[in-house]
Amino acid sequence: MKRPSLFLMALTVVFYLAADVAVAQQPDFSGTWTVRAGRGSRGFAGRGGARGGGRGRAAPSANSGSGWGNKFSINQGEETLTIERDLFRPNDLQPRIKVRFAMDGSTVHNEILMGRGIQHQDTVAAWDGDSLILTTTHYYSKPGSDEPLPYDVVQTLSLARSNQLTAPPSLVIETRIDPLPGTEGEAKVTRSTYTRE
């Protein structure tokens, strides 16, 4: 039996070291984030549409921005990433909105209780270098139809550092929303910047 050459052994070591470095470079987005004054996004152009309950939802409105509002919290672990935010006023006695995503690339189904019913979302998370990409399928209730139609929203999360080395990084979320089913037009893209509290 031939022994593996030193060259092949060296390549194997380099491969595993490179994989470890790639994992180590993946940022941690954990923390409470607030939209930076003057650095929010214009949001998506309004597309109209009736509000729907059940599995469907209304068309996205103007000033949707990142889709997570002006303030939210992220808890990032090895297996899951959790987003929590307040959508209702305190006197509404409604729980915080909480969604979870799997860090292994599997599809996760989230249900969000809204005033008009439960919204259903299916999300896949994937790393692209030091950016985390969340691709979420939403379901739109088309006026005059009981069948919810799917459309995708893609959020790309990354950390941006300023020229000041001691300054904490900002969270940048680039959000792309595809045209609603049965409509014409191009995808709309927004870019929102947040600071960590």
Image (tube, rainbow, N blue to C red):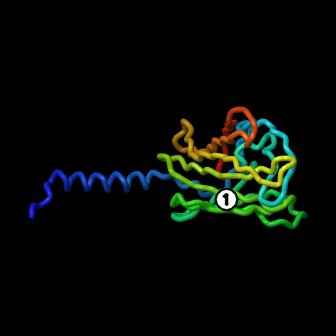
Q: Is residue 75 left or right of residue 128?
A: right
Secondary structure, mark 1, is: strand
Quadrant where the N terminus is found in the figure: bottom left
The quarter of the displayed image where residue 23 is located: bottom left
Comparing 75 with 45, the one in front is 45
Comparing 139 with 84, the one in front is 139
The quarter of the displayed image where residue 96 is located: bottom right
Q: Residue at x 80, y 53 (%)?
A: 57
Q: Return the residue at label 1.
A: 83
Residue that lies at the very extreme toward the left in this rendered image: 1
> Residue 69 location in percent, x, y?
75, 49
Q: Is residue 172 left or right of residue 146?
A: left
Q: Residue at x 81, y 51 (%)?
A: 141
Q: Residue at x 73, y 63 (%)?
A: 111
Residue 106 in the image: above or below residue 190 = below
Residue 108 in the image: above or below residue 192 = below
The quarter of the displayed image where residue 123 is located: bottom right
Q: Which residue type carries mark 1?
A: Ile
- Whether residue 76 is visible to the viewer of this picture, yes or no, is no
Q: Residue at x 41, y 51 (%)?
A: 22
Residue that lies at the very extreme toward the top in this rendered image: 185
Comparing 181 with 83, the one in front is 181
Report crowding for label 1: few under 14, some 14 to 19, many 20 or more residues within 10 A (C-alpha). Answer: some
Count how many numbered circles sit on residues in the image.
1
> Residue 10 location in percent, x, y?
21, 53
> Residue 98 location in percent, x, y?
71, 63
Q: Is residue 101 left or right of residue 54?
A: left
Residue that lies at the very extreme toward the right in this rendered image: 91
- Whether residue 86 is visible to the viewer of this picture, yes or no, is yes
